[in-house]
Amino acid sequence: MANAVTRTPHAQPHARPNPMSYMLGLKCRECGRRYPKEVVFVCEYCFGSVEVDYDYDAIRRSFTKASLAARPKSLWRYRELLPIEGEPTVGLTSGFTPFFRADRLAQALGVKELYIKDDSVSHPTLSFKDRVVSVALTRAKELGFDTVACASTGNLANSVSAHAAKAGLKRYIFTPSDLEMGKVVASLIYQPTLVAVDGTYDEVNRLCAEIGAKYPWAFVNINIRPYYAEGSKTYGYEIAEQLGWRIPQHIVIPAAGGSLITKIAKAFKELALLGFVEGKSPKLYCAQAMGCAPIANTIKERADIVKPVKPNTIAKSLAIGNPADGYYATKAVLGSGGWADSASDDEIIDAMKLLAATEGVFTETAGGVTLAVAKKLIEQGKLPKDESIVVCITGNGLKTQEPLLNRLGQPTRIKPTLASFESNLGDKLSGGPAR
């Protein structure tokens, strides 16, 4: 495992604090021990994970609803609440993705008020990973790194490849060798060094920890993870802002490593602390695939330990059997009064088709997981039918087309004549001939 505390190439631990920075430093999530703003990702005393600590009093003075009005509609509109010291340099057009009321889907599910937060059209790589990578690479550049890397189930590989290319950084991408071809191509186009490892994501991640201990690279989801993870908070900020600073009552969130759940929870706590929202925080619901549901299983069992599993699911972007933030995701869900469930491969595909047919959104398998679990929770009465529900769609279906092959039917093939058209589609035509 890489060292928990590492001096970075150009870090200046005794330099005068940057007046633009609202980071106080890093803090252990378990024992509370504080660390400087460097490459620290595990507490050297209790081995707990660390996260960024902020000066909320200073943030309150400059971060207001009025100040937001004139800012560009990107994730960087929340700059005070993100862990950088200077101006953002990566992902300047990422974030602030569509949020809309999904009335046709709500009718199909039998609920009153349903919303979709749609990161399937995130710029530039069509997943919410553009958020975390924008923050991670901006911070990596500040810390003096010229090479970035990641362990990925696909979407992160795409995002690191794209953002690092634009930032002029060298990039190494490590993935399981059975990754969907769409995600392989969507990484290779940016010309990284792509390494396909014969193993599960968890094995890839362990290998990357070893590599990170030897090579001076910024592994976005390992040694600079505390900074990287903060980017997910912007997903929660946007939900609140796009609802007119109203808190939704329920949010259904897909889980792989579990970080997105924990950071959406943190986002709403921060907004409440700063006076942007009032009332109870939303109830959070964890959505996983049946073939890889360590967090959902832990929540349903109300257990204290997340038991690793060996993934076996078409939802490869969620196929993390030993989730890094599983414990904290479990606490966030149960602490909010929420719940969890999992979806089979068939349920995932059915949900992908339902979302496309009702709302015109083509999601990847992870989105199918989220909607399938939301449907189950509604049927179980865990999600009330008369309260506001947000379903988080985090990636695009163009990347995961393989599971849909032979599941969508075939086009009707005809000859280029009106007679062929009418003879083959006569029973499907609506209305009569134009007059």
Image: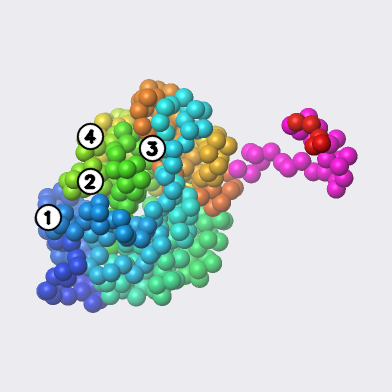
Q: Residue at x 22, y 68 (%)?
A: 85
Marks 2 and 4, how far apart at CA: 13 Å
- In the rendered image, residue 355, in percent from the top left (x then y), is placed at 52, 38
Which residues are the magenta region?
404-430
Residue furthest bottom in the image: 10
Residue 423 is inside the magenta segment: yes
Tag 4 secondary structure: loop
Q: Are marks 2 and 3 in contact (CB under 8 Å)?
A: no
| Other residues around mark 3 within 10 Å, as few (<14) / some (14–19) / many (≥20) | many
- Residue corresponding to mark 4: 280
Q: Is residue 134 above or below residue 274?
A: below
Q: Are marks 1 and 2 in contact (CB under 8 Å)?
A: no
- Label 2 vs 3, first from the N-terminus: 2
Label ID, residue 276: 2
Q: Is residue 183 above or below residue 169?
A: above
- Residue corresponding to mark 1: 57
- Residue corresponding to mark 3: 390
